[in-house]
Amino acid sequence: QVQLVESGGGSVQAGGSLRLSCAASGFTYSNNCMGWFRQAPGKEREGVATIFTGGTRTYYADSVEGRFTISQDNAKKVVYLQMNSLKPEDTAMYYCAAGWVSPATMNSPADFDYWGQGTQVTVSS
């Protein structure tokens, strides 16, 4: 019943910006966290940025902190990822996810129950 749909990916040159959106629909009994993960070829899926739906806590990977900003519109059930100063190493498939997590696991893919299909982000030099 829960559906997460990502959009906003694409190709951009290094230093450019993209804004990803994740639209949530369907019934979810409870989720306290939504956010973004990414997976590049040959690498494990990693947390990029997540946010408690109550707005009390956020997580950013060290590699993106200061460049990426996660935000949400709870009324519209949309989560955004503003990505600035993009680097080639940001190239990956970006996935939106939702789940019930603890602060210690809000960067752990295994603790998220619902996933979108992903949107590709490619950053060229």
Image (spheres, rainbow, N blue to C red):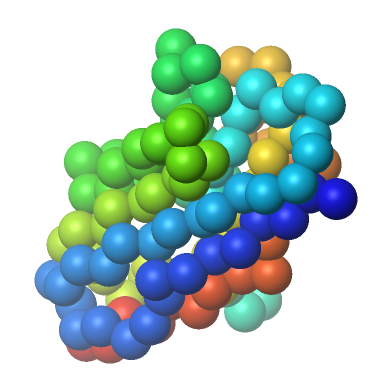
Residue 42 versus residue 68: which sits nearer the camera?
68
* Residue 83 x, y percent position in the rendering: 28, 58
Q: Residue at x 43, y 18 (%)?
A: 55
Q: Is residue 96 left or right of residue 66?
A: right
Would residue 111 be seen by someone viewing this image from the given angle?
no
Furthest residue to the top? 56
Residue 27 versus residue 86: which sits nearer the camera?
27
* Residue 99 x, y percent position in the rendering: 73, 33
Q: Is residue 30 left or right of residue 108?
A: right
Q: Residue at x 68, y 61 (%)?
A: 116
Q: Quadrant of residue 27?
A: top right
Q: How many marks?
A: 0
Residue 11 versus residue 60: which sits nearer the camera?
11
Q: Is residue 59 left or right of residue 111?
A: left
On screen, residue 45 above or below 17: above
Q: Quadrant of residue 96?
A: bottom right
Would residue 21 be seen by someone viewing this image from the given angle?
yes
Q: Quadrant of residue 125?
A: bottom left
On screen, residue 40 above or below 3: below
* Residue 16 x, y percent position in the rendering: 16, 72
Residue 119 versus residue 62: which sits nearer the camera?
119
Q: Residue at x 77, y 24 (%)?
A: 30
* Residue 25 x, y percent position in the rendering: 67, 49
Q: Residue at x 61, y 63 (%)?
A: 5
On screen, residue 121 above or below 2: below
